[in-house]
Image (spheres, rainbow, N blue to C red):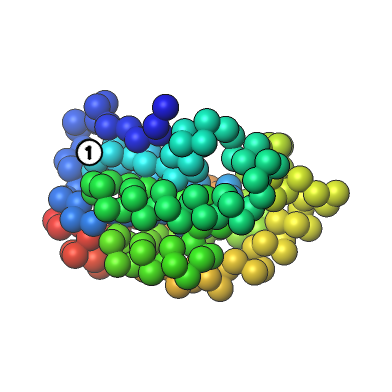
Amino acid sequence: MSEKEQITEVDTSLPRPGLLKKTIVMVGMMGAGKTAVGRALAARLQVPFLDSDHEIEAAANMSIPEIFARDGEDFFRLKERQVISRLLTEECGVLSTGGGAFLAAENRETITRNGASIWLQADLEVLWNRVRHRDTRPLLRTPDPRATLAELYAARVPLYAKADLTVASDGQATIEQMVDRVLEALRSRPDVLES
């Protein structure tokens, strides 16, 4: 089943913050809050929420760890590029991507051409606190997952910094406060969100 969700339950006490003109693409490390914040942002904007990892799993009828184990990371990254490209051209919404998606130059170009990227920037300690008790992260299935996360973080941060907008995820803000921060950042992009 597809992860594409049409938001039907909306807090009507909050005014719709504007008209979405381009898909917003949430990027960042695993544990940054891309899915949770993205889903709440889509609800606030009254647009569909999409998750590239769930779309890949639905197409393959396998979990991402199973895809990694059976076909390897290169195969997964190919499918990820195809799915992101398709989702960005289908309809306007909020798209959450996997932590490695924004690393590929082709994905960054596709996202820039068809949407706007928002990096949820969290420090290493916040990320570790969020992912350390989960075994669903194939890249962290190592003898020292914290060291692996630190290596991934150091390698990826310079690429995430190429995102169109950056929003701090300090580990203290609620999901709704994070949505407010994203909307504040989007005020500088009337080509993406028209007030």
Q: Measuring 59% from the left and 34% from the top, which residue is drawn there?
A: 63
Residue 176 seen in render:
no
Q: Measuring 29% from the left and 67% from the top, which residue is drawn there?
A: 113
Mark 1 sits on what residue?
46
Quadrant assignment, res 166: bottom left
In the image, 86: left or right of 92? Answer: right
Mark 1 surroundings: few (<14), some (14-19) or many (≥20) residues within 10 A: many
Picture coordinates of residue 192, whole percent (x, y): 22, 60
Point out the image quarter for the N terminus.
Answer: top left
Which residue type does callout 1 highlight?
Gln
Q: Nearer the viewer, residue 16 or 94?
A: 94
Q: Measuring 38% from the left and 69% from the top, which residue is drawn there?
A: 109
Q: Nearer the viewer, residue 135 or 80?
A: 80
In the image, 54: left or right of 12? Answer: right
Picture coordinates of residue 46, whole percent (x, y): 22, 38
In the image, 120: left or right of 6? Answer: right
The residue most toward the right is 143
Point out the image quarter for the C terminus.
Answer: bottom left
